[in-house]
Amino acid sequence: MPYQTQIQRIKTKLIAAQHADPDLEVFGADAHHYQLNAPIPMQKIVDFEQQHGIQLPLEYKLFLTEIGHAGESFSNSAAGPFYGIYPFGEQYQLFSNDFDQALLTNPTLLTPDTPHEIWQAQIQELYAENLSDHEYEQQEAKIFGGLFVIGSQGCGYSHALILNGIYTGKVVNISIDHDKPKFSYEAHFLDWYERWLDEVIDGNLQNTHAWFGYQMGGTESDLMQRYKNTQDHQLKYQILEGLNFKKSLTQDTLQQLLAYCPDENNENQIMILSLVSKHDAQRAVPYLEELFKTQLNTAVKLIHWYIEEDLPHWISRIYEYLPHIQDEETFRFACYILQKDEQQQFQQLKPFVQHPDLKIRKSTFYTFSFLNDKKPYETEFLHGLNSNEPPLLIQVLQAMQGLKTRAILKKLQALVVKFPYQDIEPDENGLRYYSADTDDLVYISSNISNVLKEYNLNHDSIQHINPETFEFNP
C-alpha cells in the first residue's frame, strides 16, 4: 500500500511529539496527551458510507483504521490539531437541521481562491428579509455542501474534509459564523496531520494557539526555495506567511529577504519588514525609520509588536509625528507605545480629548489610565465626564482611578442623578439578562460605583455630602 511508509512515520512522530512537548504546552495537548485509542475496522466506515451515500477520502480512512480513533480530548477526540480529531461518525455536520444529509452530499462550492467579495455576497443571501427558516437552511447547506467535519478548533471554528470536486480530500478550516473558509495547503489528511506533528516537534506550536493549518507548511529552507522560484506575488505572500509561523529564522534568510524586498509589491515588503523586525530588531531599525516617513501606520504596528530595545527613541519619534496622526488605528498603536513612556509626557495627548473621532478620544483616556499622577489632567477628565457618549464615559470612569479632587467629586454627584444605580434582577436560575436598553446604564452606573469606592461613598451617600467640605480619606 503506497501510504504505509507515511503511516509508520506518523506513528513514530506521535511518540516524538510527546517527547518534544513534555509539559503539554501545545494548544489542546493538555487534553489529548498525544493519545489515540485503537483503530477501527474498515467495515464500520464502509457501512457509514453506504448509509449516507458518500465516499470518504482514503487518507482519512487509513488514519482511522491504521493509526487510531478517538481518545482523551474534547468530545473523546483523538490527538490532533486544536481539540483533536472527532471519534468517527460523531459531530461530522457543521449545522444540525433538516438538511443534514445535503450538507454531506451537495456539490462542494468552496474553493481556496474564492474572492472575499463573492463569498460575502453568498453569505448576504442568507440574510434576505423574505427568507424562511427552511430556505435559510437550504441555502446554507448549498454554500457549505460536501463537507465532513473532523474536529473542533473552539470558538465556532472546525476543521473539515472536502468530500467531492477537484479539492476532494483536502482539509479546510470553517466557521459556524460563516467566516470565509481557509483551505490548508496540504494535499490530503495524512499530509496535514503529519505536518501538525512536525510543527509540534519543531517547537512552532508551543506556548501559542498558532492557528495551525492556516499558513503554508514546510521547512525554512523549503519555503525560501519556493520563494526564489516564483514570480507570483500572491504565492510569495503565502510563503512569507509560512515563514512568519516559524519560531525563529536564520540570519541568512533575513538577509536574503531584505535583498528581495525592493522588488516586491507593498504588501510583501511589509511582510518582509515584519519578519525582520520580529527576528532581528536591530537590523530593522533603518527600515522602520523610513517607514515613519512613508507608512506611519505600519511603523507603529511593527514597533508595538516586535521592538523592545531603544524604546525612548521610538517614543520620541511618535511624539514628533503625533500632531499629524488622523486615523484611529495609527493613533491607537502609537498610544500602545506611548504607554511605555517612563517620563509620561502625556501632556501632548491633551488636545486629543476633543478630537472628533470617538475611538481616538477613547484611546487617549485609556492612555491616561497609565499616569502615576493624574491631577495635572483634571481638566481633561472633567471634559470626558461631560460626554453624552456612553462608550467614552465608561472609558473615562475606568481611567480615572486614583484621581480625587473636589471638582471631580462634584461632577460625580451630578452623574449619580443622571445615571442612578441600576441592576437586573436574576431569574429563577440566578441568571441576569441584559438588553441594549439596559447595557449602557448598567455599565455606567457600575463604573461610577467603582470610582465612588475610592471616596468611601456610594450612589446614595454621595447625594448627602458637600463636595466643598468633604474630607478626603488618605
Image (cartoon, rainbow, N blue to C red):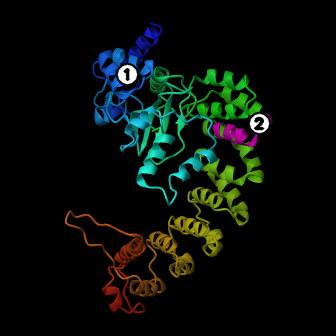
Q: Can residue 75 be seen in the rendering of this structure?
A: yes
Q: Position of residue 147 (x, y in %)?
A: 45, 33
Location of the C terminus by quadrant is bottom left
User: What is the total number of numbered labels drawn onto the structure image?
Assistant: 2
**In magenta stretch: residue 351:** no
Disc assigned to residue 264: 2
Q: Which residues are magenta?
A: 262-275
On the image, numbered disc 1 is attached to which residue?
19
Inspect the image, locate mark 1, and give the three-letter code of the amino acid beneath it.
Answer: His
Inspect the image, locate mark 2, and give the three-letter code of the amino acid beneath it.
Answer: Glu
Which is in the foreground here, disc 1 or disc 2? 2
Are dots 1 and 2 in contact, CB under 8 Å?
Answer: no
Q: Is residue 252 left or right of residue 141?
A: right
Q: Residue at x 58, y 34 (%)?
A: 111
Disc 1 secondary structure class: helix
| Of residues 340 and 89, the one drawn nearer to the viewer in this rendering | 89
Disc 2 secondary structure class: loop
